[in-house]
């Protein structure tokens, strides 16, 4: 398809694609079969500014754009979708710190997050708390010299390998506050890992806090209560990353389906000659291209300074559902071979089901879109 991106971004795309093909394609299979993502991946990703591309160089970023980062995530997602989750959590944590941490904390933590030498986590979700923040039970109470946090978190990416993270807890005013928490703090414990159907290698864990002490300066923003402006600026990063990875995943589904249709022969003809296959592949192309343009537009809005909340809710709703349809159609092209263990499209179908739930399921995105529609009306 014709590209409207700059020659510089398209050249960057090819750089990422070459790295992904040479270093991550075989690794994707190994990780899906139970191996951990090796530490050797981090310097490879850091070499293309994967951890800090859209942030300014004076804090350790790559002076790039969110549009370029979306292209990077797209190419990573085309080969190994789980890496998209692996690297984007650092951007979320760095974004929160840049908006709310002290200058000393920014200097201490942000450059190492953006060069990939250290890993961060973000702890929001709890066993009884998904998108309903009113049900959060993790508590922060004031103690001499700082805060004591007690509670339990679930579905936390990077928790087992992180050096620090941002923890959400209910403060004495019964509002939510954010705390910078080093993982070596007394009372911090990583709980059991959580295995999921797809995106194996994501390293999801429970976290348990038992009178976890953090000093006063680690209350992010300097006062209790979540600053909604921080969340509006930072949370779209996660949706850009997930949607861009889904575009890459759809591209892979299309390539796998087309390749198989050319080589699979029935009734003396490759099945790509059959009209039923034409319909499937054409629908895949349409869903892919619509999704790609939505992601690029949302990333461009973010680059232009918009919070892009509604654009990204709309994009997440459309793209993740489109990706599920495309993966299913890719399996249909393969027939029964598409559900065999070892088939690329079988792995991609399992992976894509998870993306629909991460960063807020479709039901939450619909409510966000409707909120914006009501405000306009």
Image (cartoon, rainbow, N blue to C red):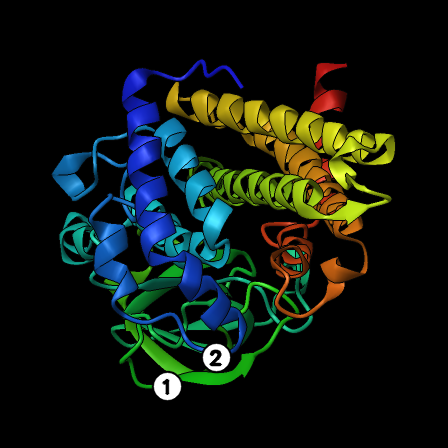
Residue drawn at x 51%, y 57% as measured from the top left? 176
Q: Which residue is mark 2?
A: 150
Residue 248 placed where, x, y %? 52, 41
Residue 4 placed where, x, y %? 45, 13
Q: Which residue is mark 1?
A: 187
Residue 16 placed where, x, y %? 32, 41
The secondary element bearing badge 1 is classed as loop
Neighbour class for label 1 at 10 Å: few (<14), some, many (≥20)?
Answer: some
Residue drawn at x 33%, y 34% as measured from the top left? 14
- Say if residue 353 shows up in the picture: yes
Q: Is residue 337 left or right of residue 160?
A: right
Residue drawn at x 32%, y 78% as measured from the top left? 213
Q: Nearer the viewer, residue 363 or 52?
A: 52
The secondary element bearing badge 2 is classed as strand
Q: Nearer the viewer, residue 236 or 104?
A: 236
> Taking 40 as reference, is 254 above or below it?
above
Q: Are marks 1 and 2 in contact (CB under 8 Å)?
A: yes
């Amino acid at each position: 398809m014709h590209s409207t991106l700059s020659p510089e971004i398209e050249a960057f795309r090819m750089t990422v694609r070459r790295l992904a093909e040479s270093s991550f394609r075989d690794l994707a299979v190994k990780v899906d079969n139970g191996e951990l993502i090796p530490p050797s991946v981090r310097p490879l990703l850091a070499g293309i500014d994967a951890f800090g591309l859209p942030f300014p160089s004076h804090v350790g970023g790559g002076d790039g754009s969110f549009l370029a980062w979306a292209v990077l995530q797209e190419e990573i997602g085309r080969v190994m979708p789980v890496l998209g989750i692996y690297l984007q959590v650092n951007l979320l944590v760095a974004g929160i710190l840049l908006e709310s941490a002290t200058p000393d904390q920014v200097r201490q933590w942000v450059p190492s997050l953006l060069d990939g030498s250290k890993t961060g986590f973000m702890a929001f979700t709890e066993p009884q708390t998904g998108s309903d923040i009113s049900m959060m039970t993790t508590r922060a109470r004031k103690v001499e010299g700082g805060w004591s946090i007690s509670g339990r978190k679930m579905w936390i990416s990077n928790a087992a390998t992180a050096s620090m993270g941002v923890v959400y807890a209910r403060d004495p005013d019964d509002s939510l506050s954010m705390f910078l928490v080093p993982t070596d703090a007394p009372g911090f414990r990583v709980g059991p890992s959580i295995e999921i159907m797809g995106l194996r290698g994501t390293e999801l864990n429970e976290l348990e806090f038992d009178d976890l002490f953090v000093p006063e300066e680690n209350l992010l923003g300097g006062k209790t209560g979540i600053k909604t402006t921080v969340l509006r600026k930072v949370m779209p990063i996660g949706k850009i990353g997930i949607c861009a990875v889904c575009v890459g995943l759809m591209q892979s589904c299309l390539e796998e389906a087309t390749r198989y249709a050319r080589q699979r022969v029935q009734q003396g003809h490759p099945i790509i000659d059959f009209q039923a296959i034409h319909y499937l592949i054409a629908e895949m192309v349409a869903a892919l291209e619509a999704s790609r343009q939505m992601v690029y537009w949302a990333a461009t809005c973010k680059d232009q300074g918009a919070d892009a909340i509604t654009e990204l809710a709309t994009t997440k709703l459309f793209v993740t559902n489109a990706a599920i349809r495309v993966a299913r159609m890719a399996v249909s092209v393969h027939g029964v071979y598409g559900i065999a263990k070892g088939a690329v499209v079988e792995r991609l179908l399992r992976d894509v089901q998870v993306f629909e739930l991460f960063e807020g399921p479709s039901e939450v995105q619909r409510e966000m879109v409707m909120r914006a529609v009501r405000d306009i009306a």
